[in-house]
C-alpha cells in the first residue's frame, strides 16, 4: 500500500522470508544496487542522524577555530602534548572536518535517494483514484454501522457531499455483497498534503544545505574600527581584517561610506555583581551610499544597518585618546586618536602608539582608564566605564619598529622584544601618566608626548551574504512542510449502503495512513454528521446495531 | 520600589515551592491509592472465588449499570465496534465490582460503555488525591506567574529569563502550565508526581544555588527575538518533559506487561504501553515543532546580534543536537524494529540532552550564550 516508502518503513509490509531461497550471486552492479538500497533505508537514515548528533558533541567541548580562535590558542598553550592528535582529528575544526562532512554528506545522499522515488510515486498517487472499497469493511481498524430510513442513492449522495466538504477525494464503487449481488459504496481518501509536506520538508533541507554550501563562496565579512569624526569606505584596502568567500573580488564590494558622528553609552550597576553593566549603546552615523546619498542613522547592537546588500553590525566600542608626539626639535611627528582596546567591564583599555618617523623609532604601550583610581599596590585601575576622570599611562620604548620592511603589522600590538624600554619596569624613569591636556617630557630629551583629548570609537563588522534570502525561503518551506506532514491526517474512509427492508444499513470504515490518533473519533463524527444530514423522510432510523 | 517587587517575587516563589511540595505529596498519595485500589480488586477476586454466587450478583448489578449508561451514551443513532476501551476502562469496571464486594466505594460505577470508548474514560472523574494534586499544582502555577510578573517589574519591565535563576523560575512555571493544559486534553494526572517533583527540584536548586537579584539586560539581549526564542524553547522543553515522562511510564509498562516487573503496582491503573507510546509521540511531536522554531528564531536573533545566523557556538551546537535526536526519534517511530522501547529511549535521551543544554552547557561550557548571570 505504501510500497514507495523505504523498505523498512513501519507502513511497508514486511518482506516475506524465504528460508530455503539461495541468494543469487551479486555482480558489481548488484553490489552497487544493494549498497544503494541499504543507504536509502529508514534504518540508515536513523543511524546517520544519531551519528550526526554524536559527532557534533566534540565541537562543543573543544574550542573551535571558527567560533573561538582565542580559546584554541589558549588550549594549545595549556595542552601542548595533545595538539598533534587534536589537529590530526581536526578537533579544532569539527564542523568542517572530513569526518563530520562525511556523515552529513552521506545523510543527504541517503535523503536524496529517498526523496526521488517517493516524489515520483506521490505524483502518481495524486493522479490516481481512491482504491476500491474492500469487501469486508468490518475488518478495518475503525468501523461503525447505522440504520437510515432512506434509499441507498440518497444516502450515498449526502455522504459524498459531506466527504467532499471535509477535503476527501471520492469515488463510487459497486462492491460484491451476499451470494451474487452487489451494493453501492463510496471510497474516499484525504490528506495527500501529508506526504507532500513530508517531501517538501526533506527537499527543503537539501535546499538549505546546497545554498549554504555553494553560496558560502559569495559571502564576505570584514572588521573595521571607526573613530569618532572619521569615516570608513567599503573597500578591501580600508578594512582592518577581511574574510572573503572563494568567489569574492574587490570589484564586488559596494563603495558605501560610514562616518561615526557620535557614540553614546549608558551603564547601570548590577545589584548582584556590583559591576557596571551596559544597558545601551548607540552610534550616530552618517551613511553615504554608492550613489552619494547621505543619511543619518543610529547603529545599535541588535539593529544592524542595511546598506545595499550588506549589513553593518556594532560589535565593540571604546576610547581613542588623541596623542601628539614631538621630537627633540619640537616638530610634531605624530598626532592622532589612537583606539585603545577594552580589557574589562570598566573599560580599562590597552593600546600602542608607533612613531616610525624619528631616529630611533619611538613606541608607546600603555593603558587608558576612563575613571582612574589607584589600587592597593599603587597601580591604576578604572572604576567606571564613563570618562569621568580619564588618565592615560604610557611607557616609552625605542629601537627599530621595522615598519619600513613593508611587512604588514598589527597596529594594536607591539613586539617589545627587539625594543629598549625607556620608562617603567626595568628603567629608572616612571611611566608617563597624563590627564587630558597634559604633556610629559620624554627621558634623555627625546621629545614630548601630549594627551590632547578623547574620542570614542566603534568596531563594526560588515557582512555580505547574498544567500540569506534563499536560506530563509527554504527554511520557511521546511517549516510549512513539517507542520503539514506532522498534523495533516491522511486517511481513507468508506461508506457502504446495504438496502434493508424499507431503509438502508450504512457501514462506515476508516483506515489511517501514518500516525493518526484521531481516526476513531473522525469516523464517529462523520457517521453522526451523516445521520444528521440524511434526508429525514419516512420512519425514524432503526435502532443502532453494534457491529460484529 | 524595585526592592519591594524583588521581595514580592521571592515570596511568591517560595510559596510556590511549598505548594508544589504539597502537590507532589498529593500526587504520590494518588499513585499509592491506585495501588490500594488494585489490592482491593485482587481481594475482591479472591472473595469472588470463595463466594461465587455473591460475586455473580455483584457482576450482574455492575453490568446492569453498564447497559443503562451505554444506552444513554448512544443517543446519536451510531454504535461502535470499538470494544477495546483501553486499560483504564477495564480497571474502572473492575473497581466497580470489587468495591461493591468489599462494601467500599461502589460509587465509582459509571463504567465506560463499549460504545463510547476511550473518549468517555477520559471524561470520567479522576480520584480524589489526583484532583487535589491538580488543584495544588494550579495554585503553584498561579504563584509562579505572580513570581514571574513581579520579578519582571523589578527588573525594569524586561522578560525575566536572562539568567539561570530567572530561567528556572519562568521555565518551571511554563512546564506546570503546559502540564495542566495537556491534562485537560488527555488525562495525565499520573504524571503529576514526576512533573511536580521535577519542578520542585529545579526551583529549589535554582533558588538556593543560582539566586541573583534582578539585573539590567545587556544590549545583546535586548531583542524581541530573545522573548520569542526563549519562550518557544521553554514550551518545547515542557512538551519534551511530558513526552519523556510518558516514555518512562511506557518502558515500565512494557516490562510489567512482559511479566518482568512486579513492583510498582500503580502501573496497572495506567494506560497500556502502546497507548502510552502513542500519547508520548503526539506530545513529543508538538515539542519538536516548538524546538524547530527555537532553532530558527535563535538563528534570526544571532543574525541580528552577531552578524551570522549560524556559527556553531556551544549553545547552538546543543540546540542542534537536541533537534537531531528528536528527528531521530520521529524516524525511529516510523522504522520497523525501532518502535516501542528503542524510540522511547530516544525520547528520554533527547530530554536529557535538553536538560544538559540548560544546565551543564550554561555553567561549564563557555560561549557567546554565557548568560548564567553568575
Ligand atoms: C537530513 C536528515 C533528515 C532529517 C533532519 C529528517 C527529519 C525528519 C522529520 C523531522 C520528519 C518528521 C516530519 C515529516 O514527516 O516530514 C521526518 C519524517 C520522515 N523521514 Fe526524514 N529526515 C532526514 C532524512 C531522511 C532520510 C535520509 C530518509 C529516507 C530514508 C527519511 C525518511 C523519512 C520518512 C519516510 C519520514 C516519514 C515518517 C513517518 O511516516 O512518520 N528522512 N524526517
Image (cartoon, grey):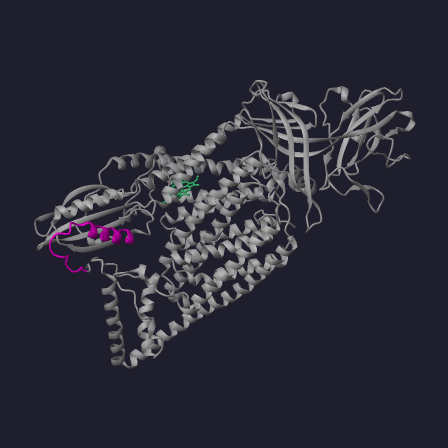
When the figure is inspected, residue B169 is found, relative to residue B368, above or below; the finding is below
Q: Position of residue B333 (x, y in %)?
A: 38, 49
Is residue A501 left or right of A295 when viewed as pictured?
left
Nearest to the observer: residue A74 or residue B209 = B209
Q: Position of residue A493 (x, y in %)?
A: 23, 47
The magenta segment? A520-545
| Magenta residue check for B74 | no
Is residue A414 visible in the rendered image? The answer is no
When the figure is inspected, residue A385 is found, relative to residue A249, above or below; the finding is below
**How many marks overall?**
0
Seen at 22% across and 65% down, the residue is: B71
Is residue A428 visible in the rendered image? The answer is yes
Q: Position of residue B2 (x, y in %)?
A: 64, 52
Quarter holding the N terminus of chain A?
top left
When the figure is inspected, residue A501 is found, relative to residue A347, above or below; the finding is below
Residue positioned most to the bottom: B51
Quarter of image, res A165: top left
Nearest to the observer: residue A30 or residue B225 = B225
Is residue A376 left or right of B37 when viewed as pictured?
right
When the figure is inspected, residue A236 is found, relative to residue B302, above or below; the finding is above
Seen at 29% across and 51% down, the residue is: A519
Seen at 37% across and 40% down, the residue is: A198
| Magenta residue check for A521 | yes
Quadrant for ligand 1 reads top left
Nearest to the observer: residue B300 or residue B3 = B3
Q: Position of residue A202 (x, y in %)?
A: 40, 37
Quarter holding the C terminus of chain A?
bottom left
Amino acid at each position: 500500500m505504501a510500497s514507495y516508502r523505504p523498505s523498512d518503513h513501519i507502513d511497508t509490509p514486511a518482506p516475506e522470508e524465504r528460508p530455503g531461497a539461495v541468494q543469487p550471486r551479486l555482480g558489481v552492479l548488484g553490489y552497487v544496487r544493494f549498497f544503494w538500497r541499504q543507504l536509502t533505508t529508514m534504518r540508515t537514515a536513523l543511524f546517520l542522524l544519531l551519528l550526526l548528533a554524536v559527532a557534533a558533541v566534540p565541537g562543543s567541548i573543544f574550542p573551535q577555530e571558527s567560533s573561538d580562535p582565542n580559546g584554541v590558542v589558549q588550549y594549545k598553550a595549556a595542552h601542548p602534548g595533545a595538539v598533534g592528535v587534536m589537529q590530526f582529528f581536526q578537533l579544532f575544526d569539527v564542523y568542517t572536518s572530513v569526518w563530520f562532512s562525511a556523515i552529513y554528506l552521506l545523510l543527504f545522499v541517503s535523503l536524496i535517494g529517498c526523496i526521488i522515488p517517493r516524489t515520483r510515486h506521490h505524483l502518481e498517487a495524486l493522479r490516481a483514484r481512491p482504491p476500491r472499497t474492500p469487501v469486508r469493511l468490518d475488518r478495518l481498524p475503525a468501523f461503525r454501522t447505522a440504520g437510515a430510513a432512506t434509499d441507498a442513492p440518497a444516502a450515498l449522495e449526502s455522504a459524498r457531499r459531506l466527504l467532499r466538504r471535509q477535503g476527501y477525494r471520492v469515488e463510487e464503487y459497486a462492491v460484491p455483497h451476499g451470494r451474487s449481488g452487489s451494493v453501492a459504496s463510496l471510497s474516499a481518501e484525504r490528506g495527500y498534503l501529508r506526504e507532500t509536506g513530508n517531501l517538501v520538508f526533506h527537499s527543503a533541507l537539501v535546499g538549505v544545505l546546497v545554498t549554504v554550501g555553494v553560496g558560502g563562496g559569495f559571502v564576505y565579512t570584514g572588521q573595521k574600527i571607526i573613530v569618532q569624526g572619521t569615516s570608513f569606505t567599503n573597500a578591501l584596502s580600508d578594512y582592518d581584517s577581511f574574510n572573503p568567500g572563494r568567489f569574492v573580488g574587490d570589484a564586488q564590494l559596494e563603495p558605501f561610506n560610514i562616518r561615526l558622528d557620535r557614540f553614546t553609552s549608558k551603564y547601570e550597576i548590577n545589584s548582584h555583581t556590583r559591576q557596571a553593566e551596559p544597558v545601551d549603546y548607540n552610534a550616530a552615523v552618517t551613511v553615504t551610499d554608492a550613489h552619494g546619498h547621505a543619511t543619518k542613522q543610529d547603529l545599535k547592537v541588535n539593529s544592524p544597518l542595511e546598506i545595499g546588500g550588506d549589513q553593518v553590525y556594532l560589535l565593540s566600542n571604546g576610547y581613542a585618546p588623541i596623542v601628539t608626539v614631538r621630537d627633540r626639535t619640537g616638530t610634531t611627528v605624530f598626532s592622532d586618536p589612537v583606539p585603545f582596546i577594552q580589557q574589562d567591564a570598566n573599560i580599562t583599555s590597552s593600546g600602542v602608539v608607533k612613531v616610525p618617523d624619528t631616529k630611533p623609532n619611538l613606541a608607546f604601550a600603555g593603558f587608558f582608564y576612563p575613571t582612574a583610581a589607584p589600587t592597593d599596590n599603587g597601580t591604576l585601575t578604572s572604576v567606571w566605564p564613563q570618562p569621568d576622570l580619564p588618565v592615560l599611562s604610557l611607557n616609552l620604548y625605542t629601537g627599530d619598529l621595522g615598519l619600513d620592511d613593508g611587512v604588514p603589522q598589527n597596529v594594536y600590538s607591539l613586539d617589545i622584544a627587539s625594543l629598549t624600554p625607556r620608562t617603567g619596569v626595568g628603567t629608572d624613569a616612571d611611566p608617563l601618566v597624563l590627564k587630558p591636556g597634559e604633556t610629559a617630557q620624554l627621558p634623555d630629551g627625546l621629545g614630548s608626548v601630549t594627551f590632547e583629548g578623547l574620542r570614542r570609537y566603534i568596531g563594526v563588522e560588515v557582512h555580505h551574504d547574498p544567500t540569506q534570502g534563499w536560506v530563509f525561503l527554504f527554511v520557511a518551506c521546511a517549516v510549512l512542510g513539517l507542520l503539514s506532514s506532522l498534523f495533516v491526517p491522511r486517511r481513507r474512509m468508506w461508506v457502504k449502503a446495504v438496502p434493508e427492508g424499507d431503509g438502508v444499513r450504512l457501514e462506515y470504515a476508516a483506515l489511517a495512513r501514518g500516525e493518526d490518533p484521531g481516526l476513531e473519533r473522525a469516523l464517529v463524527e462523520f457517521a453522526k454528521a451523516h445521520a444528521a444530514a440524511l434526508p429525514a423522510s419516512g420512519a425514524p432510523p432503526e435502532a443502532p446495531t453494534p457491529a460484529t | 520600589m524595585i526592592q519591594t517587587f524583588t521581595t514580592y517575587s521571592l515570596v511568591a516563589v517560595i510559596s510556590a515551592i511549598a505548594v508544589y511540595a504539597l502537590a507532589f505529596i498529593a500526587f504520590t498519595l494518588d499513585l499509592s491509592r491506585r495501588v490500594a485500589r488494585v489490592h482491593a480488586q485482587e481481594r475482591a477476586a479472591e472473595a469472588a472465588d470463595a463466594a461465587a454466587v455473591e460475586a455473580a450478583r455483584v457482576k450482574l448489578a455492575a453490568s446492569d449499570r453498564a447497559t443503562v449508561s451505554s444506552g444513554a451514551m448512544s443517543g446519536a443513532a451510531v454504535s461502535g465496534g470499538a470494544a477495546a476501551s483501553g486499560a483504564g476502562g477495564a480497571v474502572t469496571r473492575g473497581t466497580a465490582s470489587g468495591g461493591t464486594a468489599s462494601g467500599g466505594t461502589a460509587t465509582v460505577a459509571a463504567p465506560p460503555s463499549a460504545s463510547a470508548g476511550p473518549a468517555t474514560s477520559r471524561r470520567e472523574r479522576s480520584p480524589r488525591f489526583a484532583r487535589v494534586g491538580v488543584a495544588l499544582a494550579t495554585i503553584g502555577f498561579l504563584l509562579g506567574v505572580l513570581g514571574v510578573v513581579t520579578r519582571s517589574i523589578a527588573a525594569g519591565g524586561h522578560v525575566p529569563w536572562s539568567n539561570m535563576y530567572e530561567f528556572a523560575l519562568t521555565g518551571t512555571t511554563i512546564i506546570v502550565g503546559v502540564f495542566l493544559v495537556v491534562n485537560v486534553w488527555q488525562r495525565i494526572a499520573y504524571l503529576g508526581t514526576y512533573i511536580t517533583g521535577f519542578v520542585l527540584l529545579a526551583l529549589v536548586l535554582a533558588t538556593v544555588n543560582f539566586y541573583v537579584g534582578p539585573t539590567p539586560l545587556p544590549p545583546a539581549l535586548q531583542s524581541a527575538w530573545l522573548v520569542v526564542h526563549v519562550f518557544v524553547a521553554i514550551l518545547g522543553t515542557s512538551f519534551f518533559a511530558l513526552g519523556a515522562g510518558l516514555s518512562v511510564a511506557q518502558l515500565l509498562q512494557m516490562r510489567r506487561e512482559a511479566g518482568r516487573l512486579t513492583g510498582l503496582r500503580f502501573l496497572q491503573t495506567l494506560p497500556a504501553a502502546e497507548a502510552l507510546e502513542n500519547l508520548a509521540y503526539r506530545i513529543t511531536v508538538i515539542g519538536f515543532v516548538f524546538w524547530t522554531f527555537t532553532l530558527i528564531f535563535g538563528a534570526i536573533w544571532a543574525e541580528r546580534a552577531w552578524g551570522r545566523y549560524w556559527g556553531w557556538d556551544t549553545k547552538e551546537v546543543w540546540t542542534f543536537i537536541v533537534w537531531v535526536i528528536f528527528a531521530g526519534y520521529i524516524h525511529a517511530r516510523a522504522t520497523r524494529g525501532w518502535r516501542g522501547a528503542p524510540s522511547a529511549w530516544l525520547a528520554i535521551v533527547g530530554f536529557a540532552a535538553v536538560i544538559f543544554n540548560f544546565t551543564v552547557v550554561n555553567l561549564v561550557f563557555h560561549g557567546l550564550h554565557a548568560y548564567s548571570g553568575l
